[in-house]
Image: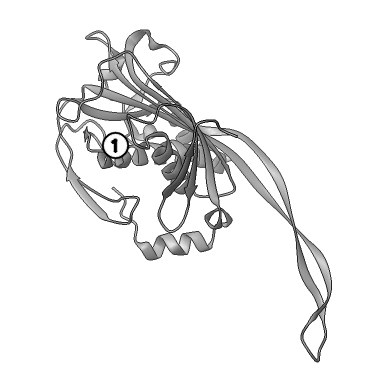
Amino acid sequence: MRLYSLASLMMLCLSLTACANKYYISIWNEKGTAKPLSKTDDVIRVVVPERLTKYVAKTRSEDSDWLDGSKLADYIGMAKLDTEERLQDLGYQLTDTGLHSGDSGQSKKIEWIDSQGNERQAMTHGGKPTVYALVDSQVLDTYTQRFISNEPYSSDPSTGATTMWTNHVDEVTMNKIVYGIKLVRPIGKDNPLYQCNNSSLSTNFCTFPEGYWEDDTRYKTIFYGVGTTTTNSPSPGYIEHHLTSSVLYQYPNLLGKKRIHQISQPFFQVTKVTDTPQ
């Protein structure tokens, strides 16, 4: 897994206008009807939508808009990695984690830095999963926002005092990003969820079939959570870390419609939780 240093995170924050502010994340979490998740008996595999393969194919194409595919693929990929880190941080057992995870069935050591900046490491279970975390993330909306500020235009040579001001206009591209997770128990021995279906086009991540997010007749849901945020941050990893830590904050206790306030530097910190999103 990824291991960030404090210095690299601080340098990243200096380059992002979002780091100077708070993230405001609206979440909606629901408890399902399936048997609750167990830290001792369950093993989780995080899987991503098969749609990822389309984005990777676009990224590898010679099309002029190949970068669009890359950005969309990054949101899904980082959502997977950050979900694994968050669930591990909460004390749950996982398998087939990390980059190029595939379907190895082997235990391995994973390392990460938690929300307080502490280096953490643990061994994954390495067994066959009993629970699947269906994870998805995408861009809901993109728009341009104008920020107007006053800047000194001229000053008194003798005193240095500002004598005239002018307006400075910055146009920033804002993206509304959504992250969703379903913790599910498959129904039926021939359920496609049991098959990893990893490939080069999925960057070797295990995928779940198209339509499975909406079609809940093939599994029983333990937990469903979704979070959205609007930001100008260009870093999918930064965004997904905020979203996953908010949706899974204090899991399984934080249920219902909430609004999360997070400070974005140098480490992710929840400062306030309200019951009704604004």
* Residue that appears at 25% across and 24% down: 37
Type of amino acid under label 1: Leu
Q: Is residue 256 left or right of residue 191?
A: right
Secondary structure of the residue carrying tag 1 is helix
Q: In the image, residue 92 lies at what x, y percent?
A: 22, 34
Q: In the image, residue 148 lies at what x, y percent?
A: 76, 56
195 or 160, which lies in front? 160
Quarter of image, res 94: top left
Q: In the image, residue 179 lies at what x, y percent?
A: 47, 33
Quarter of the image with the C terminus is top right
Q: In the image, residue 111 lies at what x, y percent?
A: 24, 50
Can residue 61 be spotted in the picture?
no
Does 240 sit above or below residue 217?
A: below
Does 8 sit above or below residue 247?
A: below
* Residue that appears at 43% across and 59% down: 266
Does 181 sit above or below residue 242?
A: above
Label 1, residues with CA under 10 Å away: few <14, some 14-19, many ≥20 = some
Can residue 219 be spotted in the picture?
yes
Residue corresponding to mark 1: 87
Quarter of image, res 166: bottom right
Extreme residue toward the right, this view:
164
* Residue that appears at 60% across and 41% down: 175
| Number of numbered discs | 1
